[in-house]
Image (cartoon, helix red, strand yellow):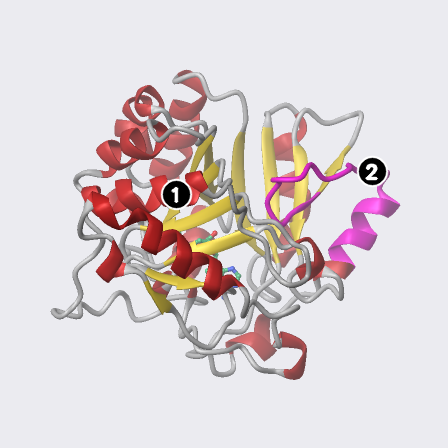
Amino acid sequence: MFELQDAFARKFHYLRLSVTDVCNFKCQYCLPDGYRPDGRKSFLTLEEIRRLTRAFAAMGTNKVRITGGEPSLRKDFTAIIETVAATPGIRKVATTTNGYRMARQVADWRRAGLSAINVSVDSLDPRMFQQITGENRFHEVMAGIDAAFAAGFEQVKVNTVLMRGLNDGELGQFLAWIKDNPIQLRFIELMQTGEMDTLFERHHVRGAAIKEKLLDAGWQQKVRAHNDGPAEVFWHADYVGEIGLIIPYAQDFCASCNRLRVSSVGKLHLCLFGEYGVDLRDLLAGDGQQAALQLRLRQALADKKASHFLHQGNPGMTPHLASIGG
Ligand code: SAM
């Protein structure tokens, strides 16, 4: 078997698969004006997702994260989970969601084979939550997290983008929340994307500064496992929960890159901040094309760069994360 490996000997066992660009939230750092429909786009069908996952799994992928846009807006979302989970070789199926549908559906997702869930919660103050996300749905999302535990998830991961002048004063509240709850709270450093203007300068908080605060307060860093996501994880003897830090501006962030992305229209993206996507869709039309698809993946990987160019102020072609799957 040819494994997905690049010229820097990085192996890719982890696929982030976007199933839609559509989102019903208007997060200030992503889609502040809401999703604008593009009538020409058609998102990957269930059959295309099945073929794509099979090809990746045949090349060593064992973990798939289903993302978007908001993946749970797809009417066949539960069937997508089932299809990915049923693919031989796939051991872990995760999703990243804004959580608005979790209270009603998370038990179905779990029965379909979902093994891990990340929910975005940018504030524990309902008014600030609405200010950041454009949606008055804080209580719904929190009920969704309770429903995930009730459905049998032992841990829920929560994504929080800390922003200066908005939610950066809430660190204490967030820590109090995870003291007795098995939540891995992941602070994501705000990333600059193509459509952002002054927001980044106004609200960016250095992830390294949060790390210093945690270490000073006695949090200790865990060792990474090979198909872990991008977070540096910290634990503390007094807390049931954990903290994850995702610091894309850290110098060595890309050295441990182990993930590839496929957009909702079937383009392979070697990096969230890359320049172009490699079209795979023509090879997803029939079951007989798997060998050609694997060859294209193998050839594309030869072009993966050592690092993104965020430090040089170049965010690449990605207009916002919802467009290729954050
Ligand atoms: N709709 C889902 C959700 O809300 O989680 C999945 C897609 S969303 C693009 C995935 C994650 O990317 C969210 O946790 C969001 O906060 C994060 N995100 C989006 N734009 C970002 C940016 N510019 N910087 C940092 N994180 C960002």
Q: Is residue 213 within the magenta segment?
A: yes
- Regarding residue 85, the answer to whether it shows in the image is yes
| Local SS, label 2 | strand
- Asked if residue 150 lies left or right of residue 242, the reply is left
Find residue 99 and report its horizontal and vertical position in percent.
36, 40
Q: Quadrant of the C terminus?
A: bottom left
Identify which residue, 280 or 152, lies in the foreground: 280
Q: What element does badge 1 sit on? A: helix
Q: Are marks 1 and 2 in contact (CB under 8 Å)?
A: no
Residue receiving disc 1? 138
Residue at 66% of width from left, 39% of height from top? Answer: 226
In magenta, the rendered stretch is 209-232
Mark yes or no: residue 97 visible: no
Residue type marked 1: Phe
Q: Comparing marks 1 and 2, which lies closer to the viewer?
A: 2
142 falls in the magenta region: no
Viewer-proximal residue among 318 and 62: 62
220 relative to 16, above or below: above
Q: Residues within 10 Å of mark 1 (few under 14, many from 20)?
A: many
Which disc, if any, is residue 201? Answer: none
Identify the residue at horizontal 46%, vertical 65% (top origin). 300
- Vertical placement of residue 6 versus 54, above or below: below
Which residue is more in the foreground, 185 or 91?
91
Mark 2 lies on residue: 220
| Rendered location of residue 277, percent (x, y) | 39, 69
Q: Which is more N-terminal, label 2 or label 1?
A: 1
Q: Residues within 10 Å of mark 2 (few under 14, many from 20)?
A: some
What is the x, y in percent for residue 27?
Answer: 39, 61
Tell how many labels: 2
The residue that appears at 31% across and 47% down in the rendered structure is 290
Q: Is mark 2 within 8 Å of ligand 1?
A: no
Tell me which amino acid carries mark 2. Answer: Gln
